[in-house]
Image: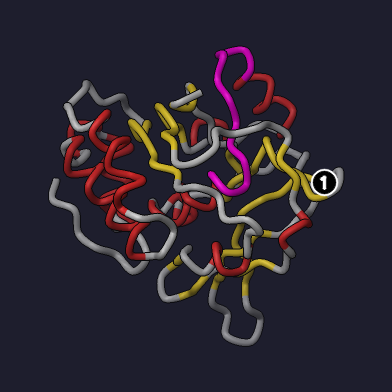
Amino acid sequence: MAITTHPGQILTPLQYEQCMLDPSALPRTAELADAEVEFLVSNGMAKESALRPLAAIVSHDSAPIRGHIPFLLIPPRPTPINWNRAMNMVRLGNQIGHSHFLANDVRDLTTPPAGAYLLCDVEDGRSQLEEGYDDQLQEIRDRHRFGLTAFEAVILVAMFPVLSHHDVRITESAHFDRLIPLYHLRNFSTREVVPVMYDHYTGFRDARFGTPSISGRHPP
């Protein structure tokens, strides 16, 4: 499948859904790596020289898996991070994402690699939509997989239109002791749906929410 630029994303929602159902529809690995590099560079998240060595690692084609994104390039995390600026990369139709979090409002519960790195074998959480958060987290651990940090999740939903399909729970970052979701918020004046990152309790069973996971990070 040829990559068609969507505002703020490297696949349109229709293309993304086709790829999730039929992994053979995914762009070739080298093409996908180039698109991810271009996205991050054009959004000012990293210099190309920091990403190309990682893109070279994944430039060979591998057998795609249904419902999986084979890899996701993560740029060096800004210090301090401007969460609203990061969420501005996220688009839902013509709506631009936002967040009210300040730089120190979010703490990671795991230590990701320093510098740029890869997320390997990304599932976007759609297979868990009928499960509560505790069940989703247990399933991820039982399968020896790992959740995403808030920064990683923002990169995921900025590059790929996951939020066009379902809302996202984040397991490896927290706002004080509260979960951080990426979700739709309807603007009651315009009736348009805006992607936001903010905290609220999402432990109940809720068919809107899935919890993305990965098989690992490289380098670890």
- Which quarter shows the N terminus? top left
Quick check: is 150 in the magenta stretch?
A: yes
Residues drawn in magenta: 141-152
Residue drawn at point x = 48 percent, y = 27 percent: 217
What colour scheme has been applied to the protein in the rendered image? secondary structure
Q: Position of residue 167 (x, y in %)?
A: 57, 50
Decide which of 156, 50 is in the foreground and name it: 50
Q: Total marks drawn? A: 1
Decide which of 213, 20 is in the foreground and name it: 213
Read off the residue under disc 1: 178
Asked whether, in this view, residue 180 is left or right of residue 10, the answer is: right
Using the rendered view, name the quadrant where residue 9 is placed.
bottom left
Residue drawn at point x = 33 percent, y = 31 percent: 70
Decide which of 201, 174 is in the foreground and name it: 174
Asked whether, in this view, residue 162 is left or right of residue 70, the answer is: right
From what the image shows, is residue 16 above or below residue 81?
above
Quick check: is 27 in the magenta stretch?
A: no
Q: Which residue is the extreme one toward the left?
A: 2
Using the rendered view, name the quadrant where residue 111 is placed.
top right
Tag 1: residue type?
A: Arg
Q: Position of residue 201 (x, y in %)?
A: 80, 48
Residue drawn at point x = 41 percent, y = 64 percent: 44
Q: Residues within 10 Å of mark 1 (few under 14, many from 20)?
A: some
Q: Element under label 1?
A: strand
From what the image shows, is residue 92 above or below residue 69?
below
Q: Position of residue 3 (x, y in %)?
A: 19, 53
Residue drawn at point x = 54 percent, y = 68 percent: 97
Q: Position of residue 137 (x, y in %)?
A: 67, 26
Asked whether, in this view, residue 69 is left or right of residue 82, the answer is: left
